[in-house]
Image (cartoon, helix red, strand yellow):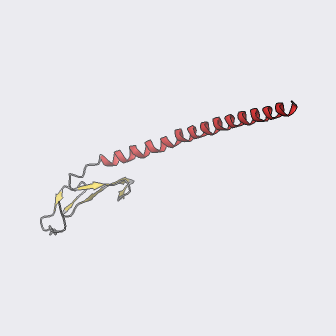
Amino acid sequence: MMANETKRFFYTVCLLASVALNIFLVRNEWKKQKLSSNWAQEAAAEAEAVALISCSGHGRAYLDGVVVDGKPVCECNTCYGGPNCSHFSPDCAVDALRFSF
């Protein structure tokens, strides 16, 4: 009779320890997700800010591209230049076969 009570007590302790460990791990994982979503939101905001930079349709600004005075600048397509890629170079030769649509 005493052996059954000891086994029952042992199983109860194991069950409670398992439940407590699961609660602890789930709580820690939830906190990590809360912190990790913060950096993701900041990265998305930075990417959106760079995407709003106008390059006149003749270039593009990249988050990890050329930086001047701490801010990303336009990287212009062939034959275009200037701070917002709006200046066309009439003497520019473009290889039309290289570009396919």
From the top left corner, tell me how far across and down residue 41 is, in percent.
43, 42
Could you tell me residue 42's position as x and y percent?
44, 43
Please state, as top left, top right, bottom left or bottom right, where the C terminus lies in the image: bottom left
The single residue placed furthest to the right in the displayed view is 2
In x, y percent, where is residue 91?
13, 68
Numbered-mark total: 0
34, 66: nearer the viewer? 34
Residue drawn at point x = 75 percent, y = 35 percent: 11
Nearest the viewer among 31 and 51 is 31
Q: Residue at x 80, y 32 (%)?
A: 9
Out of 72 and 42, give the one closest to the viewer: 42
Q: Residue at x 85, y 34 (%)?
A: 3
Q: Which residue is most to the front?
A: 1
Q: Where does residue 2 sit, x and y in percent of width and height?
A: 87, 31
In the picture, measured across the screen, residue 68 lies left or right of residue 33, that is left
Location of residue 2 with respect to 74 vertically, above or below: above
Q: Is residue 22 above or below residue 99?
A: above
Relative side of 18 to 4, left or right = left
In the image, 50: left or right of 8? Answer: left
Residue 76 occupies quadrant = bottom left
Q: Nearer the viewer, residue 29 or 2?
A: 2
Q: What is the quadrant of residue 59 in the picture?
A: bottom left
- Which corner quadrant holds the N terminus? top right
Residue farthest along the left direction in this orientation: 90
Q: Which residue is depicted at the point 60% across and 37% down?
A: 26
